[in-house]
Amino acid sequence: MSLVVIVTRDVADRFRGFLASTMLEVAPAVYISPRMNAGVRLRIWKVLSDWHGAEPRGSIVMVWRDMNVTGSVGIENLGSPPRELVEMDGMWLTKRML
């Protein structure tokens, strides 16, 4: 289980209502769950992906600890250009995928 953070921007109210029912809203449009397993995280992301596919407005970013990827941070995006972590000269950088 790991910390999961989801940040929304300019999405329909139902996204915010759904996330508020499954996670803690610590600031406007910022949701966290201190201990979420991978199965729950994937189910929540599936709901968000399906809804965003039907109503592609705004953006959603989800981050969580993933020891199998660069920087040990998993990232998923909806609506904004996808990003990935890359290592360059010993530093972690965010690369926008176009």
Image (tube, rainbow, N blue to C red):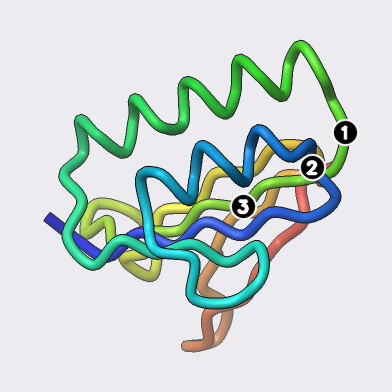
At numbered mark 3, what does the secondary structure look like: helix, strand or loop?
Answer: strand
Give yes or no for contact between labels 1 and 2 (Cβ–Cβ under 8 Å). yes
Upstream in sequence: badge 1 or badge 2: 2
* Viewer-nearest of discs 2 and 3: 2
Q: Name the residue under label 2.
A: 11
At numbered mark 2, what does the secondary structure look like: helix, strand or loop?
Answer: loop
Instruction: Please identify the residue farthest to the bottom as the structure is shown.
Output: 90
Gap between marks 1 and 3 measured at Cα: 13 Å
Residue 8 placement (x, y as % from top left): 69, 54
Q: What residue type is labelled 3?
A: Val
Upstream in sequence: badge 2 or badge 3: 2
Q: In which quarter of the image is the C terminus?
A: top right
* Viewer-nearest of discs 1 and 3: 1
Q: In which quarter of the image is residue 85?
A: bottom right
Residue 68 placement (x, y as % from top left): 24, 52
Compared to 57, does 37 lie above or below? Answer: below
Say whether residue 78 is left or right of residue 6. Answer: right
Gap between marks 2 and 3 measured at Cα: 12 Å
Q: Mark 1 points at which residue?
A: 57
Q: Residue at x 46, y 31 (%)?
A: 45
Q: What residue type is labelled 1?
A: Arg
Q: Residue 61 carries which label?
A: 3
